[in-house]
Image (tube, helix red, strand yellow):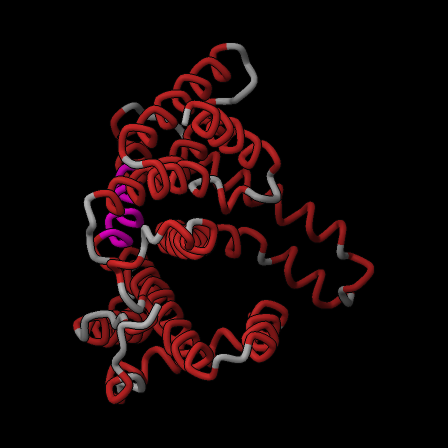
Amino acid sequence: MLKHVLIAAVSTIFLFKSGFFVFVVPVPVFYIFAVHGRKAGRLTAAIVVAAAVLGTAFGLLTQQELAYFGYLFLIGLILGEGLVRRLAIMPMASAAIFIPWIMASGFFLAGQFGFNMPLISNLRAYFADTLNFVLDKQAATISNAQLAYIRDNAAQIVDFIVGITPSTLMIFGMLVVSLATLLTRSLSKKYGSFKYLGNVAMQRFPFWSVWVTIACGVAYFSDAYYTHNIYIKFTAINGLLICAGLYFVQGCFVISFWLYKGRSPFLRFLVYGIIVVFLQVVGFMIVALGLSDQWLDFRKRHNTTAA
């Protein structure tokens, strides 16, 4: 067991430092919880935390990198604890999404307003530098008129990106939790750790999310035509983006359910490939599918507990 614990701890650090595989940082810790239980999982977590703290002390990780790593690592820890406690998928995933998000938001607000740290200014500067870098790299593929328009409105673009940071972070958490659960379930399939969850693709989000979407839409248009309050505007936009993320996940559940009923690995591979390659176009269709499922419930007559 100790060998697997050390491998998982090293893999967690390696995945984070690789950059490309940062989305799956929670998987090694989650896997140890799923296969070897709570004791091994917590030992792995302790080793990872110690390594991260030492890495920061010796300058191998910056404080910003440590915060980012802590966010991802906490997702894996919460998922692992939820699995060994045999929580249902919705409470387990919700905790893994919301707890790190709330903690990150709390630390940000405390730093900005409690300790007078220029975090918002730093975010603006970071996004401005990133936008300029992208424009410089893509200058040859963008028309002069478009390039001039983007540069003239760069400040407004940056302000918008900063304003939607809360929803962006939450959607990022949804993505990380979904990938971690999918990969860990696949890797630990022979151990049967996820069997008690039944068919995850049968899950549906509560209908109140529809009312939240409607309320955010009303708030957005009310601000556009009447109130003109920046806080109402960005609260509405963040709410709409978060709801869109929920419907995207629910749409993926519907697609996954019907693809696995067909039992065609090639068809699953083809559909998933199309979704990944054409995400910007197909994404809107998946969101619409998830939203319509709130009323039509495409899986109601085919309820099953198959994995």
Given residues 263 and 175, the one toward you in this image is 263
Q: Residue furthest right?
A: 140
Residue in view at x 37 percent, y 72 percent: 253
Against 184, residue 89 (above or below) is below
Q: Quadrant of the N terminus?
A: top left
- In the figure, residue 233 lies in which quadrant? bottom left
**Residue 211, how many percent across, how many down?**
19, 75
Residue in view at x 34 percent, y 53 percent: 192
Query: Magenta segment, principal secondary structure?
Result: helix
Against 217, residue 292 (above or below) is below
Against 217, residue 95 (above or below) is above
Given residues 144 and 250, the one toward you in this image is 250
Task: Answer with left or right where residue 121 lies relative to residue 106.
Answer: right
Q: Which residues are magenta?
A: 92-103
Tell me, yes or no, whether the highlighted magenta stretch contains residue 202.
Answer: no
**Residue 180, how many percent across, how many down?**
43, 50
Residue in view at x 77 percent, y 67 percent: 143
Whether residue 199 is visible, yes or no, is yes
Whether residue 163 is visible, yes or no, is no
Tell me, yes or no, whether the highlighted magenta stretch contains residue 101.
Answer: yes
Total residue callouts: 0
Q: Residue furthest front?
A: 190
Given residues 261 and 50, the one toward you in this image is 261
Task: Answer with left or right where residue 161 lies relative to residue 216.
Answer: right
Q: Quadrant of the C terminus?
A: bottom left
Residue in view at x 24 percent, y 45 percent: 82
**Residue 197, how many percent across, how many down?**
26, 60
Against 225, residue 103 (above or below) is above
- In the figure, residue 294 lies in which quadrant? bottom left
**Residue 32, how many percent across, how many down?**
39, 37
